[in-house]
Image (cartoon, rainbow, N blue to C red):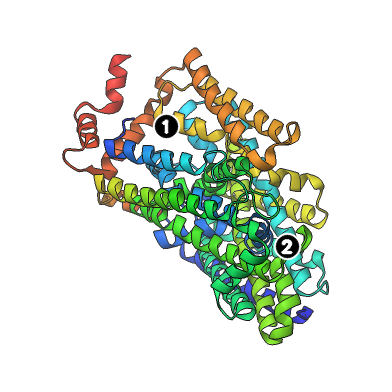
Amino acid sequence: MLTTRTVWITFIVYLAFLLSVAIIENARFRQKNARGFATAGGSIKWPILVMTYIASLMSTWVFFAGPGAYYRGGIGYWASELSYICLFPLIMHFVMNKVWVINSTRKYTTPADFYYDRFKSPLLRVILALIFLSASFPYVASVLISISKAAEIATGGAIAYQQVVIIVGVVIIAYVMIGGLKSIALTDTIQGLAYISILWIIVFACLFTAFGGSLGNALYAIWKNTNEWFSYPGPDEWVPYSARFGYPFSCAIGWTVMLPHVFVRSGYSGSDLNTQRKLMFLTPILQAFVWTGTMLIGLVSIALLPGLGTSDTEYIIPYLIQNVIRYIHPTLAVVLMIGFFIGSVAVGISTADSFLLVTGSIISEDLLRHTFGLKLSEKKQLLSVRIVILIVGLVSILFALHPPELIFTLIMFAIAIVMPLFPILVLGIYWKRATRQAAVISAIAGTVLVLLTYFVWNLGGNWYGAFGFAGSLICMIVVSLLTHQDPEDSREFYEALSRGEESCYDMIQGSKGHVFHACMKKHDFGARKNMRK
Amino acid sequence: MKLTKTEKIWLAVVIIFYTCYNLPFVPAYYHPKATLIHAAMTLVPLWIAIYVGLIKVCRIYKLREPKEEQKQEDEAC
């Protein structure tokens, strides 16, 4: 539909803009160490943190399979999304803000650093590094594949898939290597604003073109023609009771907190607790805003074109533009197709760059440095992270050029595979009795359960990581009660938490928390533990 | 780690509404009106509970101004 020239010009202008933003940002804040490079050293202010979180969280799914999922899943699918989106402030308050408080004094680089600091287990670090890698590495290649598909669809196959993969891949590698998280955060913010705006422009354009701007008319058409869209399990029986729980539950934990790139953003990167609070308040609203836009495209599509097959609904936005809008407003169709292409590129790149950075830091820090004992100066350490990013990026490009089936399999359960790590995190923070043996067994048992859920019991499509989560939680409690770990191992960790909370919060008089804080102040939380020993 | 009473109530209320939303066999399949009523009776209170609780908890945990040395350290990073 678009000419090859139009796509290339749009594409090159856009990528050049991203690259220049990264170079300028790097010139302003030159990174001095691997931690600053990978986590921005806890210096990101709230507007950038919120946008980089949202942009890196949402992948090309928003423009590709997303609207089709609402088409097939119906309003029940949207309700299930809303049921987990709002849980984010709760998880942030009880878990990730505590991670932030401890990190503010303990200075972590990778998610596994936090677990290691609590449990002092090198084996646990390796297991976690492998789990986090298996969740993040395939994403880089998959996003390159999606962006190239978008270019292919937008030009009706006129543009070469391989060329797009190589150019996007090289630009992403370049700007991640140049500026690290600091420049990624800024480009994510720009891209986040771009794709959210484009999404809603597409929503309004579709609604006005098809139903004269009347949402009521669209709803009436669905009520009349595809009534099952308004009920569970949806038109394609996509949302049975099990999936209504399993999918949102896994998203609430696996997707919004435990995937390593969002773990770093929600736990390490915020400049202060005020920034963390803004993230808590705004993220659910922004997420709901984006998913509602995606849902409305699915809604307009099923109102207008009921009975489409799965393959058509996977690419419902270009399908609508090419088969409906093109015949009513040809110029608008071209503009929307450019919007679809830019939106897909923006939402894809903002995810791929984050995964590339975190993959690089996990390999460099958790494996090369802490596991294989590679001792380097700070400067060389930073260089090693950049080299690892280059290698991982190039391997991802190769995978994207010839995608093996394994990549799609790994992506399928990326959200689920990190879920068993959540009980270890929570009990590690709240329960001093939790031991390293329990953490190791829970991580292994939980991962095995997730693999069984997908590949043996064939329940992954509905239950995701729920069984892995439950297994990990049970193992964590039972094994901790049966084993013992020297409290000295976690003393500094808990002291960092109690001192950090004391210095960050000013409890109001009369609350139980105030009494607790006063008590901590008076007796010194960590020291009292030592006296008992 | 101890929790304040407000935090415990917040947690409990959210779990209750989340459980209500996820009650198996409610609403029955292929009942649009029941689906809409169920969503209104569980999701709307869930969102309200989250934000009301968040505001209350944030009032209890008032934030202190970060120390000057901490700010300098952050900037150095």
* Position in image of residue A357 (x %, y %): 60, 52
The quarter in which the N terminus of chain A is drawn is bottom right
* Position in image of residue A141 (x %, y %): 72, 54
Q: Secondary structure at mark 1?
A: helix
* Position in image of residue A119 (x %, y %): 49, 26
Using the image, determine if residue A263 lies above or below residue A348. above
Give left or right: position of A454 versus A479: right
Residue A231 visible? The answer is: yes
Chain letter of disc 1 in the image: A
Residue A373 visible? The answer is: no
> As rendered, which of B58 and A48 lies closer to the eye?
B58
> As rendered, which of B26 and A109 lies closer to the eye?
B26
Query: What's under tag 2, amino acid-wise?
Result: Thr
Give left or right: position of A317 versus A205: right
| Picture quadrant where residue B8 is located | top left
Give left or right: position of A345 versus A110: right
Q: Residues within 10 Å of mark 2 (few under 14, many from 20)?
A: many
Using the image, determine if residue A99 lies above or below residue A56. above
Q: Give the mark nearer the N terminus: 1 vs 2.
A: 2
Chain letter of disc 2 in the image: A
| Residue, disc 1 | A429
Instruction: Please name the residue shown 83% across and 74% down the image.
Output: A158
Using the image, determine if residue A192 lies above or below residue B40. below
Q: Residues within 10 Å of mark 1 (few under 14, many from 20)?
A: many
Instruction: Please name the residue shown 61% across and 63% down the image.
Output: A347
Query: What's under tag 1, amino acid-wise?
Result: Ile
| Residue, disc 2 | A313
> As rendered, which of A373 and A271 lies closer to the eye?
A271
Mark nearer the viewer, 1 or 2:
2
Residue A511's disc is none
